[in-house]
Amino acid sequence: MTIAPPPPWGLLAELTHACPLHCGYCSNPLELTRRSRELTAEHWVNVFRQAAELGVLQTHLSGGEPLLRKDLEAIVTGAEESGIYTQLVTSGSGLTADRLRSLTGAGLRSVQLSVQHADPAASDRIAGSRAFAAKEAAAALVTDAGLPLGVNAVLHRHNLDAVDGLVELALRWGADRIELANTQFYGWGLLNREALMPGRDQLARAVESVNRWRDQLDGSLEIVWVAPDYFDGVAKPCMGGWGAVSLTVTPDGTALPCPAAATLPGLDPVNIKDHPLRWIWEESKAFNLYRGTDWMPSPCRSCERRDQDFGGCRCQAFALTGDATRTDPACSLSPDHTALTALTHSAPGELTDLVPRRPTTGPRPASHA
Ligand code: SF4
Ligand code: FES
């Protein structure tokens, strides 16, 4: 008898790939889903009903920019009526007092606001768009409305020296939490990897800042530090394990074990329009391919850390070796570890510009063309 896997608790709902920003670190796929292929609000309501029955407790309404969905209120209502806690993950562009009022009326519970740098001009440069002022205004709207505010910054060579400023900004904006997440190199971000890769010394300074702020603030602002796994020889427990705690539904309804998994070979992901969510979670090939430990190669198979890091990240293994079944090269025990250490430097050379995110596959950075 097959034992059903434990239920997921989180659902990443990618409502649209459309976005007014052009961040060079964007991890969304190179080929974005056209707006005409997006799920309708009715589909999403159905997804949330099934997700709640499966055990999902919270959803991140993400994108792209979810505020571009004119039917976002109906989508929030669907999640709320299914008893799922909603967090809007937004750049802040397009958020007005009226829009926020109607979203909170629909049941929105919290907001996570992205920011690219503490300095407005640098933030706009990284975002490829004059977006900082809208973010500041959005933060004020969210806290005035009494909603919990989280600030999220993706970190890389162009902003790792601004960690102090980012924490000060989160405090000034009245955030409860700041997530400082070092770049993961997928999608468009993989094309900009060389320009994004920080130096070891720069990273060490950022860690020092985080520790100092944590001591100083003593929990009054939650500081989440998502370490880069390129530098310490330790694989990250990506997604908390494959098909273990959460799932992603992309704008066109494809259900994935992780947001970057669409390009992995042999996955055969299916669409929520064609299969019940429970079947997808429990029985589909995509969710079972790397679930548990049976799939693992050596050295993971006999490693004492296999139940803690789950062999690392499948998408990273694929990006660096062309084979998603290999041990994540981030791990110092991986036979491919040098493929990763070759990309890191103590003190990298001249800072180079990021190639801004474009809607589809555009011209690529010269080093990766
Ligand atoms: Fe984790 Fe595999 Fe490395 Fe062991 S060998 S630490 S299980 S990635
Ligand atoms: Fe896909 Fe890690 S990002 S498994």
Image (cartoon, helix red, strand yellow):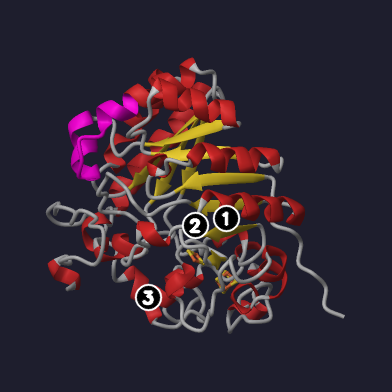
Alpha carbon of mark 1 to alpha carbon of mark 3: how far?
A: 36 Å
Crowding at label 1, few (<14), some or many (≥20) Cα neighbours within 10 Å? some
Q: Which mark is residue 39?
A: 2
Given the image, on which type of amino acid does mark 2 rest?
Leu
Image quarter where the N terminus lies is bottom right
Crowding at label 2, few (<14), some or many (≥20) Cα neighbours within 10 Å? many
Q: Which of the marked residues, 1 or 3, is nearer the chain's N terminus? A: 1
At x 38%, y 25%, the residue is: 96
x, y percent for residue 226: 47, 48
Q: Is residue 133 magenta?
A: yes
Disc 2 vs disc 3: which is toward the camera? 2
Pointer 3: what residue? 320
Pointer 1: what residue? 43
Given the image, on which type of amino acid does mark 1 rest?
His
Q: Which of the marked residues, 2 or 3, is nearer the chain's N terminus? A: 2
Q: Is residue 332 visible?
A: no
Magenta-drawn segment: 120-136
